[in-house]
Amino acid sequence: MKTKTVALIAVMIAIIIALGFIPGIPLGFIPVPIILQNMGIMLAGALLGSKRGFLCVFIFLLLVALGMPVLSGGSGNIASFMGPTAGYLLAYPFAAFLVGLVTEKFNQANVFLEFLLIWLAGALFVDVMGAIGLTIQSHIPLHQALMANLVFIPGDTIKVLIVTLIHRRFKNSSFLQA
Ligand code: BTN
């Protein structure tokens, strides 16, 4: 693997961790907070592409599994993958991959299409997988878990907008090319 790829992945992991420093907003009716860190997951896919984005987020989750407190609010250990947010966490690398895939395949798309594709791949996908995880882990009926996840849509939509604009600003930068 090229030194540049390693450096880009390392920087992106640092950005994801830094976004986790901003504490989440707990919600009383669902054991999942509103966080900023998932914006870093989408950004990894959009800026690094599908394969490097997947690898980046996979390594980030390895750090979590090793017990490093890199998740939002300073949590992180192997038990995180069995808790109420497991569905979201396990979806993260695939979301980065999908965001990378759509931004690679629709490189010339207009801003609205690009926004929609990133929203589907990076926000809706994670929220649905998270709801499925909640159903399995916390025995909340799926329709109820899906309804509860609607609370994340406004914030996640703003994050997708920011990711779309950052991607459009940097997508032709030779610095990000493999
Ligand atoms: C964790 O740090 O344990 C994962 C938290 C997952 C929170 C999810 S990510 C998608 C959705 N949007 C949010 O702001 N929060 C949830």
Image: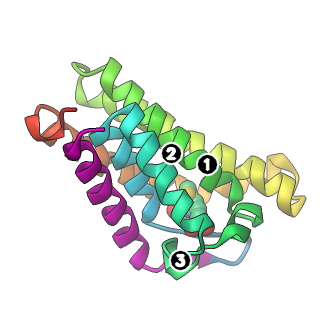
In the rendered view, would you say 24 is above or below 156? below
Q: Which residue is mark 3?
A: 25
Residue 116 position, x and y percent, is 40, 32
Task: Tell me, yes or no, whether the highlighted magenta stretch contains residue 27.
Answer: no
Left or right of 162 on screen, residue 131: right
Range of the magenta residues?
A: 1-26
Label 3 SS: strand
Label 2 SS: helix
Crowdedness of circle 3 by 10 Å Cα count: few (<14), some, many (20+)?
A: few
Which residue occupies the foreground of this view, 102 or 161?
Answer: 102
Which residue occupies the foreground of this view, 168 or 11?
Answer: 11
Crowdedness of circle 1 by 10 Å Cα count: few (<14), some, many (20+)?
A: many
Residue visible at 76% across and 47% down in the picture: 132
Instruction: Tell me if the residue at label 1 has its CB under 8 Å from ligand 1.
Output: yes
Residue 38 position, x and y percent, is 46, 57
Mark number, residue 123 = 2
Residue visible at 31% across and 24% down in the picture: 104
Specify the amino acid type for callout 3: Ile
Left or right of 105 on screen, residue 8: left
Residue 126 position, x and y percent, is 58, 46
Crowdedness of circle 2 by 10 Å Cα count: few (<14), some, many (20+)?
A: many
Disc nearer the start of the sequence (3/2): 3
Q: State which quadrant residue 26 falls in.
A: bottom right
Report the magenta stretch's main SS.
helix
Specify the amino acid type for callout 1: Asp
